[in-house]
């Protein structure tokens, strides 16, 4: 059970709000999403939908695909990302992965 009390802050990549949020569902992935939790720790997430994941897996030719902190969801949208981050935060997910190093 999570001991967190404040909701995490989601920082989308540069340019996401203007145009990216409309293009991302068709593209099927979004990388470089930063989540900052109450203690200041920051985590980088990579969101994929199953169709794009399957396409990338097939095109890689290695028999596997690995992205740090990959989250797979039915459709990559702003709302789905926000909902997933909230659920992951409540479940204590961010205590199980390594934060980004401080700048």
Image: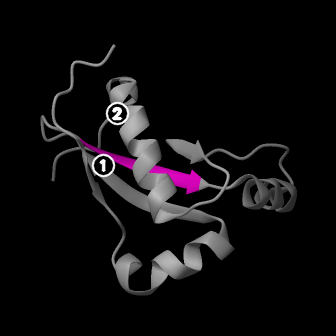
Q: Do the residues labelled 2 and 1 touch (CB within 8 Å)?
A: yes
Let me know if residue 54 is in the magenta part.
no
Is 42 left, or right, of 73 in this rendering?
A: left
Q: Where is residue 74 in the image (x, y as percent from the top left)?
A: 67, 52
Per the image, label 2 sits on a secondary structure element best described as helix
Is 10 left, or right, of 73 in this rendering?
A: left
Q: Disc 2 and disc 1: Cα gap in Å?
A: 10 Å
Q: Residue 89 carries which label?
A: 2
Per the image, label 1 sits on a secondary structure element best described as strand
Q: Which mark is residue 58?
A: none
Q: Looking at the image, is 12 positioned above or below residue 70?
A: below
**Could you say which is closer to the camera, residue 11 or residue 84?**
84
**Could you say which is closer to the camera, residue 35 or residue 91?**
91
Could you tell me which residue is drawn at 47 percent across and 44 percent down? 84
Is 66 left, or right, of 13 in this rendering?
A: right
Q: Mark 1 points at which residue?
A: 35
The boundaries of the magenta stretch are: 42-47
Q: Farthest residue toward the left?
A: 39
Could you tell me which residue is drawn at 15 percent across and 53 percent down? 103
Could you tell me which residue is drawn at 78 percent across and 43 percent down? 64
Q: Position of residue 61 (x, y in %)?
A: 87, 55
């Amino acid at each position: 059970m999570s001991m967190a009390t404040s909701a995490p802050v989601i920082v989308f990549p540069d340019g996401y709000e203007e145009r990216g949020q409309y293009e991302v569902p068709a593209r099927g992935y979004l990388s470089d999403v930063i989540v900052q939790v109450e203690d200041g720790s920051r985590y980088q997430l990579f969101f994929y939908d199953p169709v794009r994941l399957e396409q990338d897996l097939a095109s890689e030719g290695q028999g596997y695909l690995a992205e740090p902190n990959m989250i797979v969801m039915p459709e990559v949208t702003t709302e789905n990302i926000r909902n997933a981050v909230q659920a992951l935060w409540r479940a204590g997910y961010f205590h199980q992965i390594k934060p980004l190093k401080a700048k």
